Amino acid sequence: MIDVDRFKSINDRYGHETGDAVLCEVADAIRGTLRGRDIVARLGGEEFGVYLCDIAPGDVDQVAERIRLAIAERKIRVGNRQIAVTASLGVAVAGPDGLTFDDLMRGADGALYAAKSSGRNRVCFAGRLQPA
């Protein structure tokens, strides 16, 4: 799960049209880091979800960090200004232990909360998940 940091302040300062443009830029940054078989979707508000298909668990942290950096390094122009945007990521990894989609979402959401509460603009991982 990916959440744009301090997005409300962007909408408040620059307006919702600019906020929408920022979300489009963030989506493009995310898509630019993924393979063709991976899936990205807007979950709501300023939150996105990414499903990495057929990836070794050890490679997930590299992809998550690439996504974080791609967003942070993106130059988003608003009129004659540039807006700096960062995002926090919460990651849950499925294994062979029968986790449901809801289990993964719950784990990723908890990890996202940890990323936000520990300073933002970072990646946090869910601990070992148990099936519900």
Image: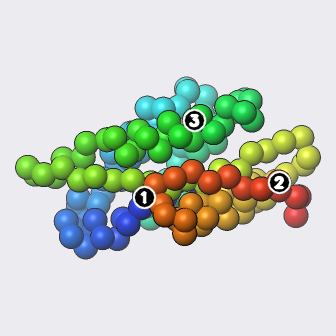
User: Mark 1 or 2 closer to N-term?
Assistant: 1
Q: Dividing the image into 4 quarters, which one contains the C terminus?
A: bottom right
Percent x, y of residue 120:
47, 60
Q: Are marks 2 and 3 in contact (CB under 8 Å)?
A: no
Q: Do the residues labelled 1 and 2 touch (CB within 8 Å)?
A: no
Type of colouring: rainbow
Residue drawn at point x = 41 percent, y = 61 percent: 5
Q: Is residue 62 above or below residue 45?
A: above
Label annotation for residue 124: none
Percent x, y of residue 92:
71, 50
71 left or right of 94? Answer: left
Estimate the spatial distance between the alpha carbons at disc 1 and disc 2, rounded to whole Å: 25 Å
Residue density around tag 1, few if under 14, some if 14–19, many if 20 or more, within 10 Å: many
Q: In this view, does 66 lie above or below 42?
A: above
Mark 1 or 2: the one toward you = 2
63 left or right of 103? Answer: left
Residue receiving disc 1? 4
Residue drawn at point x = 44 percent, y = 64 percent: 45
Residue receiving disc 3? 63
Q: Is residue 113 visible?
A: yes
User: Mark 1 or 3 closer to N-term?
Assistant: 1
